Each structure stands twice: as C-alpha cells, then as structure tokens.
Image: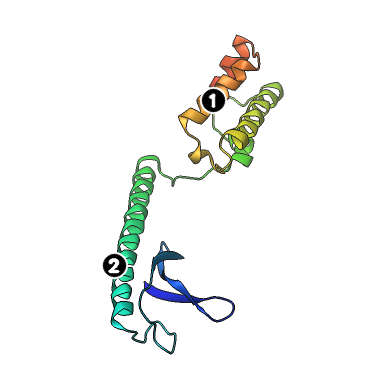
Amino acid sequence: MRLLIKKHADGRLRPTWFGAYAVNGKLKVATLSRWKGTPPESKMVGDRGDEAFEASRQAALEQLHQIVEGAKSDADREQLVQRIHRHRYGHKVEAVPLASLAQKWDKIPGKKKAGALQKKICHQILTRFVDHMLVAAPGAKELGAITKEHVAGFLEAEEKRGAAPRTWNRTRSVIRK
C-alpha cells in the first residue's frame, strides 16, 4: 500500500493523490483526495513538501487505509463463502458466463439424458433468456449477477410473447434448473 502522485503528459503534476494496493493478488489504484499546499521541488512522493502538503498526505493515507480495509473485508467475506460452499458441496463456487449457459445446462446430471427435441427446446429457452438479459441487465456477464427481478422480467416477457401455458411452465422449469 502506497501513495502515488501522477503526472500529466506535459509533465505537470495531477492535483490528486492516488493510492496503490493489492487485494487477492491484484493491484488496484484508487483516486483519493486532492493534495493541498506546495509539493516538493523534486516532484517525488517520498520527499517532503510544505506543511499543507504533508497534512494532505496524511489525510490521503487515512483515506487509503479505509479503502484497503473495506476491500479486504469484502475479499474476506467472499473467501468465507467460498470455503463454506467447498466444505458443504465438495467443490468451489463456479462462475457461469451467460454466453455458455446452454452448454452448462447440457452437463447438469440427471436420472436420464435429455432427448434431441428436449435439448433443442431447452437451448431455445436459454437463448431467449440470455438475449433478454443482454437488454435487461447489460452489465451482467455471469449468471451470478442475475437477480430474481431479472428472471421475473424474463418470465413476464415470455407471458407477453403469448407463450402457451405448457410452454411457459416448461420455460419456468428450465430457468429454475
């Protein structure tokens, strides 16, 4: 964890502190508060500036500590969930990209394998679901980002599309699985 001062392309200092830190092995850079006072002549972070500059450095350090603690507690929570899931189910939580949802559906274990027609119907349903999610939740790239409101919106769209009751029930069953 360290403070940074960045420069513009023309060599002038940016008037903002930046903080670099690592969480789960990934380097992150956060924009912090603006610095005040006069920076050192050398324009290096380690050198001392005037009192106002040093006070702004301390404020930026405190801000960076808060950001790092928040990021670490989020990472700790995620690791705890991963450990509980691994302990309970014997494997880690796997992120399923929406684009490969139909292929993942094919690999779901069951008492008997789906026939060609069943497979085709399920792939059509999942394709409609993914297409709907691209519009309803454009930022969602993985299945874990989909909420129950998104799914309810998809089922409403299916109902508005004029799906027969049997089709709607099959759609609901496939999405639930």
When asked about the image quadrant of residue 140, the answer is top right
Q: Colour scheme in the image?
A: rainbow
Question: Would you place residue 87 above or below residue 30 in this image?
Answer: above
Residue in the image at 50% along x and 36% along y: 146
Q: Amino acid at mark 2?
A: Glu
Q: Amino acid at mark 1?
A: Gly
When asked about the image quadrant of residue 45, the answer is bottom left
In this rendered view, identify the residue nearer to me: 134 or 12.
Answer: 12
Residue in the image at 42% along x and 89% along y: 41
Residue in the image at 55% along x and 75% along y: 8
The residue tagged 1 is 153
Tell me how far mark 2 sits from mark 1, CA to CA.
43 Å
Q: Residues within 10 Å of mark 2 (few under 14, many from 20)?
A: few
**Residue 124: x and y, percent?**
68, 27
In this rendered view, identify the residue nearer to me: 66 or 11.
Answer: 11
Q: Specify whether 6 is left or right of 37.
A: right
Give the mark, 2 or 1, whose residue is nearer the N terminus: 2
Q: Is residue 40 visible?
A: yes
Q: Residue furthest bottom?
A: 42
In this rendered view, identify the residue nearer to me: 23 or 117.
Answer: 23
- Tell me the element at label 1: helix
Q: Residues within 10 Å of mark 1 (few under 14, many from 20)?
A: some
Question: Would you place residue 76 above or below residue 148 in this image?
Answer: below
The residue tagged 2 is 62
**Residue 101: x and y, percent?**
60, 37
**Residue 98: x and y, percent?**
59, 39
Residue in the image at 54% along x and 32% along y: 109
